[in-house]
Image (cartoon, rainbow, N blue to C red):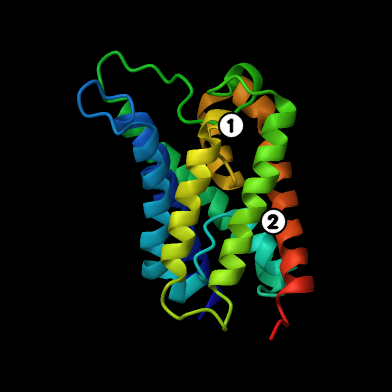
Amino acid sequence: MKLSQKLAAEFIGTFWLVLGGCGSAVLAAGFPELGIGFLGVSLAFGLTVMTLVYGLGHISGAHFNPAVSVGLWMGGRFESKELLPYIISQVLGGIAGAGVLYIIASGKPGFELGGFAANGYGAHSPGGYGLTSALVTEVVMTMMFLMIILGATDKRAPAGFAGIAIGLGLTLIHLISIPVTNTSVNPARSTSQALFVGDWAIGQLWLFWVAPIVGAILAGLIYKMFFDKAE
């Protein structure tokens, strides 16, 4: 597969992740009569990933997340030369998704940007959780997400079920961590929303790059050391 095709797939996949996941939070979660709520947003993020693992996974590997690319690289499953191009495509795809979401959301009379599904801690955490809680949550949740991905895509795993495991894994992660950080585990998703919110979201964005990358590196190291060559 050509690199240009892979990068296009990563752009489209991250675009869909942001539009589908963050879109569910911005457009549907708080709707007075038909709001999908906390569970619905969690499912939306899981479903966006699951649908395109099957739709585009055969083209690019369906990373759609800089932390996933880093974790797979650390685990020996991804080439170094493609790491930076993948991350750039993912960030650009996320920004495009947030841009489309903004155009849709701003078409409603009385629109206010508000948090725009951005990630935060302290006063900007949905549950008021502080910096330490946010940092630990994002590191651990990303680490476990990568453990799921590395395990489900291992050549010894049952074929054809990786997308289900990954999608449900991301759903569970959101169920756990939305109250703490509004759930990132994905620097591209965090960046896309922060650029539109500005101010505090930009100021806190560092955590949503550092913590997921650290979690992904830990997962790659653990999997490579203990499970990669297991019989």
Q: Residue furthest top?
A: 110
Q: Residue furthest bottom?
A: 231
Identity of the residue drawn at 73% across and 82% down? 229
Identity of the residue drawn at 21% across and 29% down? 34
Quick one: SS at disc 1? helix
Number of the label disc, if any, that sits on residue 153: none
- Residue 23 seen from this side: no
Number of the label disc, if any, that sits on residue 181: 1
Task: Give the position of the C terminus as an image quadrant.
Answer: bottom right
Q: Left or right: where does residue 35 sit relative to residue 66?
A: left
Give the mark, 1 or 2, whose residue is nearer the N terminus: 1
Q: Position of residue 41 (x, y in %)?
A: 38, 38
Q: Report the amino acid beneath label 1.
A: Thr
Q: Report the amino acid beneath label 2.
A: Ala
Tell me: residue 132, above or below residue 3. above
Q: Position of residue 139 (x, y in %)?
A: 70, 45
Tell me: residue 186, above or below residue 218. above
Identity of the residue drawn at 37% across and 30% down? 26
- Cβ atoms at labels 1 and 2 below 8 Å apart: no
Q: Left or right: where does residue 63 sit relative to residue 106?
A: right
Q: Position of residue 206 (x, y in %)?
A: 71, 35
The residue carrying pointer 2 sits among few (fewer than 14), some (14 to 19) or many (20 or more) residues within 10 Å by Cα, namely: many
Mark-to-mark CA distance, 1 and 2: 17 Å
State the residue in front, 172 or 3. 172
Q: Quadrant of residue 83?
A: bottom right
Quick one: SS at disc 2? helix
- Residue 228 seen from this side: yes
- Which residue corresponds to mark 2? 216
Q: Residue furthest left?
A: 33
